């Protein structure tokens, strides 16, 4: 993944990455996705897996489209 950036009018550096960079970062990980070790409650260790196809769904979820269920 490459770190890219652009400068605003005030000359501040604003880092960003492209969606292609995100997909490229998943290229060498396992079929389970990217394993990220986490420590829960200060003592329990788990590995949480992130996969690109689920992550993309989360990134591009349309929050303006809500469904109302009447029961």
Image (cartoon, grey):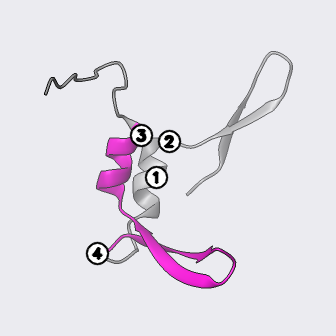
Q: Residue sitting at 69 percent across and 78 percent down?
A: 42
Pointers 2 and 3 in contact (CB under 8 A)? no
Give the image quarter of residue 7: top right
**Which contiguous range is marked in magenta?**
32-59
Give the image quarter of residue 50: bottom left
Residue 59: mark in rendering = 3
Q: Is 66 placed left or right of 47 in the picture?
A: left
Pointers 2 and 1 in contact (CB under 8 A)? yes
Pointers 3 and 4 in contact (CB under 8 A)? no
Query: What separation in Å lies between label 3 and label 4 (alpha carbons)?
Result: 20 Å
Q: Which residue is mark 2?
A: 18
Q: Secondary structure at mark 4?
A: loop
Q: Secondary structure at mark 1?
A: helix
Q: Residue sitting at 76 percent across and 21 percent down?
A: 8
Name the mark nearer the viewer: 3 or 4: 3
Q: Up-down: is 17 above or below 14?
A: below
Q: Which residue is mark 1?
A: 22
Dot 1 or dot 3, earlier in sequence: 1
Q: Which residue is mark 4?
A: 31
């Amino acid at each position: 993944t490459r770190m890219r950036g652009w400068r605003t009018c005030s000359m501040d550096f604003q880092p960003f990455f492209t969606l292609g960079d995100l997909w490229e970062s998943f290229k060498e990980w396992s079929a389970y996705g990217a394993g990220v070790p986490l420590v829960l409650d200060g003592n329990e260790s788990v590995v949480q897996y992130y996969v690109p196809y689920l992550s993309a769904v989360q990134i591009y979820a349309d929050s303006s489209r809500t469904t109302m269920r009447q029961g």
